[in-house]
């Protein structure tokens, strides 16, 4: 029996080619993993009647650990995000997105080493929405007016932003525990409490209370308004350490941080709950590149590095990270996005699997 069994969700768009590159690199370390493939997304709907079949969730529940490729979400209409559904179904409340500089990738900065901790289950992502013109929207508009909460135009569509004490306590604790376990020095709570007094205001109040519990830990706590955070991230990315944010700001700020370190092609992520963990890159399915063997698998591979650390396979994780740094640093065998950042042209870039070959050779 293999030492680890991991659920592998290839996803769609560029997902299958990236997860192929990732499993090839992980297997090349010699770490003993059986990949249990369980597919989700629009392409499984005809067979199962849903983009997220129950056996996919059962596989993750059984194995406790999964790694996935991106999955497309139709815009405006169609099914709700499979990615969001997986996080909700498995209560993966913490989304961890490290952003660190990799020399030679053409990024604007070379001094970034920060971690986004995004709350994953509530806020505007809770999916509580009322369609414009629906009975629910009409009632809510009437209710808000009757309560004196405010006036919404009668032709409004409405999305709610719930933020709870429970959800905030556990994500802020997660951020502090992560900071302590990983030798970090500072946790910054990011919010818009000056305007959103009952959602972000509560987030900030609870974050301050939880920070008090950790006051002897040596970890510095501060808070920052989200718009100012964005500006300071661009001006002084080296200031930041661990940032803890409500769901939507976490989503947006982590893409900003991906841009600071050189692009979505190299930004890894993890969704972690009390029982299960699902690893996935920050980026989406980039449909225009699907099947072309050009997308950068580094984000997927660095997500596997996070997974290997989670599984206690620290040596394999460190070797893959060193191989990524070496191959990108040399600049010979890099995918189109990195070549474009470094030289302004994609000429001389290599294919997804050829880059994986270079990493394997380096390992
Ligand atoms: P995206 O797929 O992340 O792609 C946006 C752009 O980022 C690409 O056009 C490409 O830039 C760059 N990029 C992304 N991944 C890359 C990679 N591996 N290598 C190199 N460059 C990469 O964002 P999107 O187009 O907004 O979303 C497409 C679909 O993915 C949507 O249906 C969305 O809902 C879904 N999505 C899924 C997840 C998930 O599964 N967790 C996350 C986000 C979005 P250039 O055009 O400059 O080359």
Image (tube, rainbow, N blue to C red):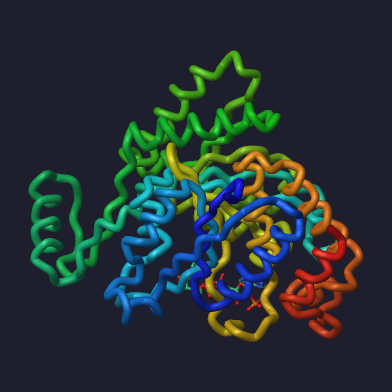
Tell me: 83 left or right of 78: right
* Image quarter of residue 35: bottom right
Up the image or down, 355 lies above or below 315; here it is: below
* Residue at position x 10%, y 51% in the image: 143
Q: Is residue 257 visible?
A: no
* Residue 329 place in picture, x, y as percent: 88, 61
Q: Residue at x 54, y 66 (%)?
A: 69
Q: Is 244 left or right of 262, judged from the image as shown?
A: left
Q: Residue 233: image x %, image y %? A: 66, 49
Of residue 168 and residue 84, the one placed in the foreground of this image is 84
Instruction: Looking at this view, name the residue that lies furthest to the front.
Output: 1
Say left or right for 261 vs 15: right
Q: In which quadrant of the rendered image does the C terminus lie? A: bottom right
Please report the residue visible at 37 percent of the width from the left and 37 percent of the height from the top. Answer: 167
Exactly how many numbered labels are in the figure? 0
Q: Position of residue 48 (x, y in %)?
A: 30, 74
- Tell me residue 41's x, y (percent): 41, 72
Residue 185 visible in the current orientation: yes
Relative to residue 280, is residue 44 depicted above or below? below
In the depicted view, which residue is nearer to us: 162 or 302? Answer: 302
Looking at the rendering, the quadrant in which ligand 1 lies is bottom right
Residue at position x 45%, y 44% from top? 276
């Amino acid at each position: 029996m293999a030492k680890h069994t991991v659920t592998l969700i290839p996803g769609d768009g560029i997902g299958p080619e990236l997860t192929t590159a990732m499993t090839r690199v992980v297997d090349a370390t010699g770490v003993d993993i059986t990949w249990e493939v369980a597919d989700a997304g629009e392409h499984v709907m005809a067979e199962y009647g849903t983009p997220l079949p129950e056996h996919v969730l059962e596989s993750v529940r059984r194995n406790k650990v999964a790694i996935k490729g991106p999955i497309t979400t139709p815009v405006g209409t169609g099914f709700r995000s499979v990615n969001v559904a997986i996080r909700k179904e498995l209560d993966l409340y913490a989304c961890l997105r490290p952003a660190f500089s990799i020399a030679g990738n053409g990024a604007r900065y070379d001094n970034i080493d920060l971690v986004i901790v995004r709350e994953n289950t509530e806020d505007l992502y809770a999916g509580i929405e009322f369609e414009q013109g629906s009975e629910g929207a009409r009632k809510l508009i009437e209710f808000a007016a009757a309560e004196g909460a405010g006036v919404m135009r009668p032709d409004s569509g409405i999305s709610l932003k719930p933020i709870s004490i429970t959800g905030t306590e556990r994500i802020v604790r997660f951020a502090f525990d992560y900071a302590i376990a990983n030798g970090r020095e500072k946790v910054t709570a990011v919010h818009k409490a000056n305007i959103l007094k009952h959602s972000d205001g509560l987030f900030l109040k609870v974050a301050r209370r939880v920070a008090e519990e950790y006051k002897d830990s040596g970890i510095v706590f501060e808070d920052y308004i989200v718009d100012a955070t964005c500006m300071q991230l661009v001006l002084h990315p080296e200031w930041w350490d661990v940032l803890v944010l409500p769901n939507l700001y976490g989503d947006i700020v982590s893409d900003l941080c991906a841009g600071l370190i050189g692009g979505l092609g190299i930004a890894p992520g993890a969704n972690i709950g009390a029982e299960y963990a699902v690893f996935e890159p920050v980026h989406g399915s980039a449909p225009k590149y699907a099947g072309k063997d050009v997308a950068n698998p580094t984000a997927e591979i660095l997500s596997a590095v996070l997974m290997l650390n989670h599984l206690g396979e620290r040596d394999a994780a460190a070797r893959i990270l060193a191989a990524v740094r070496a191959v990108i640093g040399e600049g010979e065998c890099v995918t189109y996005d990195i070549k474009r950042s470094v030289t302004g042209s994609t000429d001389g870039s290599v294919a997804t699997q050829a880059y994986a070959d270079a990493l394997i050779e380096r390992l």
